Image (cartoon, rainbow, N blue to C red):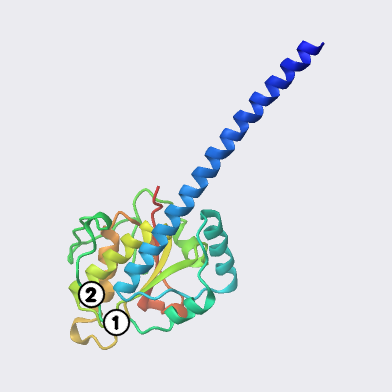
Amino acid sequence: MRAKGFDALKGMKARLSEESAIREKETAARMERREKAEDDRALFAAEMKRIGVTPTERDASEKDLFEKEMKRLGVVKLNSATRRAEATKKPPRPVVEQTPVKLRAEVGLSDSYDGASADDWSDREYVAVGCGIDLTQKLSRGLWPVGAHLDLHGYRTEEARRALVDFILQAREAHIRCVRVVTGKGINSGEEGPVLKGQVRRWLRQMREVQAFVQAPAEEGGSGALRILIAKKF
């Protein structure tokens, strides 16, 4: 009986040791994911500041969803004073330098691209081929909170193209699914009409990082703004 009891204790000790090793590995993996998420957020924030992007203000429900997701990823929440200060900054003139190569894909966007198809029936909304057609409805309902905002007012065409590409790629690096881009309605665009408004929609249709976009609601800019869904980064 004593021998059996001793063997049982040895077996229990071995199991406890194995479970402890597993827990240590899981803890190390969680710490690594948390550090990676924090690094991505910091890098994204720095790049967005460089190109003049300001963070968005969310309503209570969107804020709750966003904060839960950030908590799951282990991202540290910025204090409210910092967020308000960033949100009130006036965006500077765009910087047209190239983003670091490791963060920028080679994206060739045509100004004359014709993306009209069964998946794109108007300039109000778009769904990439192979994606669910219900994405536009979900975007319109605000299923994904808007995580970043880019205002292209005052940008020349080439400046806007570079800023848009950088913005989308950086948002994806930071695991942000939904962003808003404001182009303006082009009321004062002259005989050519709202050039930038149409160009941005053409460029977005050519980016594999973009799964869908919809016209923003009136309080976010209406026909002069878009909500954009970005593909997940695995």
Name the foreground residue: 114 vs 175. 175
As helix, strand or loop, the secondary structure at mark 1 comes to loop
The spot of residue 118 in percent (x, y) is 33, 55
Q: Amino acid at mark 2?
A: Val
Name the foreground residue: 204 vs 75. 75
Relative to 145, say whether 117 is above or below. Answer: above
Residue topped by disc 1? 92
Name the foreground residue: 113 vs 182. 182
Residue topped by disc 2? 95
> How many numbered discs sit on the rendered protein?
2
Q: Quadrant of residue 188?
A: bottom left
Asked if residue 125 can be seen in this view, the reply is no
The spot of residue 59 in percent (x, y) is 56, 74
Name the foreground residue: 23 vs 68. 23
**Which residue is painted at 57% across and 60% down in the image?**
68
Which quadrant: the N terminus? top right
As helix, strand or loop, the secondary structure at mark 2 comes to loop
Q: Are marks 1 and 2 in contact (CB under 8 Å)?
A: yes
**Which residue is painted at 51% across and 79% down in the image?**
81
From the viewer's perspective, is 152 left or right of 158?
right
Q: Amino acid at mark 1?
A: Pro
Whole-angstrom CA distance, mark 1 to mark 2, is 8 Å
**Which residue is painted at 47% across and 56% down in the image?**
134
